[in-house]
Image (tube, grey):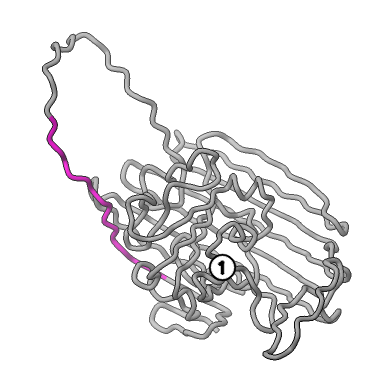
Amino acid sequence: MKTTPASFSFLPIIRRSLRWQLGITALATGLACGQTESEKPAADANAVEQLGEMTVVASADASADGLIEAYAGGQVARGGRLGILGTQDYMETPFTLTSYTEELIENQQAQSVGDVLLNDPAVRVSRGFGNFQQNYIVRGLPVYSDDMTYNGLYGLLPRQHLAAELVERVEVFRGANAFLNGAAPGGSSLGGTVNVLPKRAGADPLMELTTGIQTGGQLYGAVDLSRRFANDGFGVRLNGVLRDGDTAVDGESVSLGMVALGLDWRGEKLRVSADIGYQDLRRDATQPSITMGAGIPVLPAPAASKSVAQPWTFADEKDFFGVLRAEYDLNDNWTAWAAIGGRDG
């Protein structure tokens, strides 16, 4: 099924989707306050004033200043995107927002967005009914994995699982989500939502190669490359990952291939970006959710290495997705942006 801006479906399962959004974001401005100051000697006309250093971090956010900086330790950022309100500092909004950084994802060796969300005490990670889809419970209400937003747009991400290697930040918003981000196409995200920011090329060239092996014999390899060109105006970032083999659970295996390309161009007032991704995921005998009925005594839990899945169960998913975004600063306080994206899978 293919959906367009003129005709779209509210079914929980969306096989093919095309989403577009057009908006104007007002950035908050502070009030000027008067201050009395004692008279100072006149400055020397020939003196050179030394300005403080300013660092702009490449970002997928609608902000000329880039990503909001992280708190000390680098695990959580000071703010993030709040839908039509744009990028805001956490302490300057009436909503609850937590933004987990790439550094936390790497330090914890997270394999999926669900692994990152395990850090949040207000979020529970579960699975869908009769499938292997990750399902996030925010304030007691579900957020389907394909109802997450990708750089602010709904309906673009793979349904079952999203590899963490393509993620710059995972932003968890708790509150009146439809008011700020619009209604989710799958009908979830009533108590909050999760926004995923794709990676961008930083100021310094990057070339990382990661290899490993996990319990059960599963092999892993990932590459992360980035560089900026044309006086740092144009940036390219490429991420790829391969994961294949048995897990620590008897009879369970996972095969994952993912590649993501992020392109961005920065001008004085105009910023344009494109993010394209492909993910191929195969799961065999993955452990399902088990729900006990009323009146049934809780059975002793089996050993963690023992499988409770049927050996013939599997999930095979291939997704091609992307988003194109443009932002223009009308003045110091107003930014206009337009974005369009789609998914085939």
The part of the image, by quadrant, that contains residue 338 is bottom left
Picture coordinates of residue 122 (x, y %)?
52, 64
- Residue 155, position as x, y percentages in the image: 50, 72
- Magenta stretch: residue 51 in it? no
Vertical comparison of 47 with 144: above or below: above
- Which of 305/277 is in front? 305
* Label 1: which secondary element: loop
Q: Which residue is mark 1?
A: 157
Query: Horizontal placement of 149 versus 160: left or right?
Result: left
Q: Position of residue 30 (x, y in %)?
A: 22, 45
The quadrant in which residue 300 appears is: bottom right
Which kind of residue does numbered mark 1 sit on?
Leu
Does residue 317 sit above or below 292 in this rendering? above
Question: Could you say which is closer to the camera, residue 327 or residue 152?
Answer: 152
* Vertical side of 339 occupied by 287: above or below: below
Q: How many marks?
A: 1
**Is 33 covered by the magenta stretch?**
yes
Name the residue: 42% across, 58% down.
325
Left or right of 78 on screen, residue 220: right
Start-end of magenta stretch: 20-35
Residue under the image location 82 percent in, 77 percent down: 308
Q: Name the foreground residue: 230 vs 178.
A: 178
Within 10 Å of the Cα at label 1, are there few (<14), some (14-19), or many (20+) other Cα atoms? many
